[in-house]
């Protein structure tokens, strides 16, 4: 689960990090009041969407040269037109896709003079089996680019989940980053706040970029991003309350309500598979044979008729889908049971695109016979290669 920047900053501030004053607004009137409440001092207007690259983004349909979703201003008269643009046009960034994302929330943040920018984050590193603190002097940039071009500029520290971040290690990192004097204490406090949020809230990512140093030596969290492990939300009602479903894919939300693991992609071949590994393998082989998966969909090991039917509704609700591949390995879910569910869903939903089904495993012969005797226009395949070739051809109209 993702949250907005302003929400991430609230978590870091509560954990002890220094965050610039900010006011969340949803209209021109609220933005003007926020500017006045801050004493008419310089502010930064920041569009709040669940995507990075906002500053370099483009408002689709807005006048050319109007700029991205992060705007610095010292002029009260520029507040209204900027906020109007933010709320009127979808913001397209490298992470939103071509359609962009509607902006409904804006953070009016007190501007800060910046002498130097740093990068600070905690991630779950599966290679070491635990959380890792990352820090770099190259703040304000894409960390992937830094890792690719100058990996030596990224400091890493594996964090013990039992003991957390040791004071001595935090101070060592602060010194390696070039902090001196009282800045070391500030940097340590910020690192501890980052670690506290990540560990206590079951995060998958907690990032501060940039972590800024002002000309007077103050260390501030200027931008923040936090993602959470969905499977741990039952432990954090406060985090779950931060969820903004308007920022999420409607099809993915619908699937989650039915206990389906679904991620929408840009292709035209719908996939219905049981098991995450098999789903990934199915997508790979479709791609290998020249097709493009429209989704990742794992119905799980014990899906019932209602879940399979809902899965088909979701797949067929995507106008880009030109064919559907069902790939089931029968274990807990027996092939004859899934075959019956496919027929029921086929009749209830009403297919308007070709359907290819590949079954293997428990009661596979019974399942294949059920499909063959149905009289419905369902193509079958015994092997995964055959299934992929058939569905790719069907999607291409062959």
Image: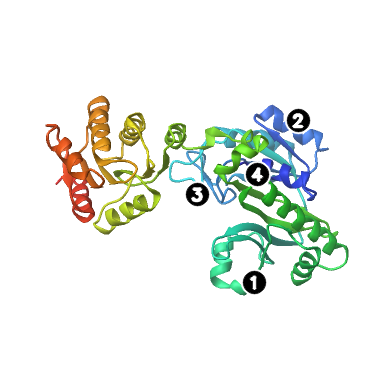
Say if mark 1 contacts mark 3, CB within 8 Å.
no
Cα–Cα span, label 3 and label 2 = 31 Å
Q: Is residue 269 left or right of residue 99?
A: left
Q: Secondary structure at mark 1?
A: helix
- Dot 4 falls on a residue whose secondary structure is helix
Q: Residues within 10 Å of mark 2 (few under 14, many from 20)?
A: some
- In-front residue for pair 367/349: 367
Tell me which numbered mark, 3 or 4, is placed earlier along the sequence: 4
Residue displayed at 53% across by 33% down: 246
Q: Position of residue 393 (x, y in %)?
A: 18, 49
Q: Position of residue 296 (x, y in %)?
A: 38, 46
Quick one: label 1 or label 2, which is nearer the N terminus? 2
Q: In screen coordinates, is 233 left or right of 190? A: left
Q: Who is closer to the viewer here, 145 or 262?
A: 262
The residue that disc 3 covers is: 95
Mark 1 or 3, nearer chain start: 3
Which numbered disc, 1 or 4, marks the residue that appears first in the sequence? Answer: 4
Name the outermost residue toward the top: 348
Q: Quadrant of residue 298?
A: top left
Residue furthest right in the image: 181
């Amino acid at each position: 689960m993702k949250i907005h920047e302003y929400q991430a900053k609230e978590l870091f501030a509560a954990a002890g990090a220094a965050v610039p004053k900010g006011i969340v607004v949803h209209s021109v009137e609220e933005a003007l009041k926020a500017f006045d409440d801050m004493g008419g001092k310089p502010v930064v207007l920041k569009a709040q969407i669940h995507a990075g690259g906002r500053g370099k983004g483009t408002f689709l349909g807005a006048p050319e040269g109007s700029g991205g979703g992060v705007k610095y201003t010292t002029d009260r008269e520029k507040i209204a037109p900027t906020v109007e643009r933010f709320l009127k046009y979808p913001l397209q960034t490298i992470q939103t896709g071509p359609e962009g994302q509607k902006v409904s929330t804006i953070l009016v943040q007190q501007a800060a003079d910046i002498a130097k920018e740093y990068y600070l984050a905690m991630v779950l590193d599966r290679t070491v089996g635990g959380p890792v603190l990352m820090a770099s002097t190259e703040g304000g940039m894409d960390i992937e680019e830094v890792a690719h071009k100058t990996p030596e500029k990224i400091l890493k520290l594996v964090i013990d989940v039992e003991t957390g971040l040791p004071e001595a290690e935090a101070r060592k990192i602060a010194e390696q980053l070039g902090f001196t004097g009282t800045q070391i204490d500030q940097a340590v406090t910020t690192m501890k706040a980052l670690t506290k949020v990540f560990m206590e809230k079951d995060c998958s990512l907690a990032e501060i970029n940039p972590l800024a140093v002002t000309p007077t030596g103050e260390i501030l969290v200027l931008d923040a991003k936090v993602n959470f492990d969905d499977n741990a939300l039952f432990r954090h009602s406060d985090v779950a309350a931060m969820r903004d479903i308007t920022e999420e894919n409607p099809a993915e939300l619908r699937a989650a309500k039915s206990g389906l693991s679904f991620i929408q992609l840009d292709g035209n071949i719908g996939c219905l598979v049981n098991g995450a590994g098999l789903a990934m393998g199915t997508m790979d082989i479709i791609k290998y044979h020249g097709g493009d998966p429209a989704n990742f969909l794992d119905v799980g090991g014990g899906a019932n008729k209602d879940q399979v039917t809902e899965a088909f509704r979701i797949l067929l609700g995507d106008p880009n889908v030109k064919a559907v591949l069902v790939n089931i390995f029968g274990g807990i879910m027996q092939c004859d049971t899934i075959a019956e569910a496919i027929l029921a869903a086929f009749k209830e939903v009403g297919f308007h695109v070709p359907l290819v089904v590949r079954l293997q495993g428990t009661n596979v012969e019974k399942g294949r016979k059920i499909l063959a005797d149905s009289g419905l226009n369902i193509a079958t395949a015994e092997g995964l290669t055959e299934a992929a070739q058939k569905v790719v051809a069907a999607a291409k109209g062959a």
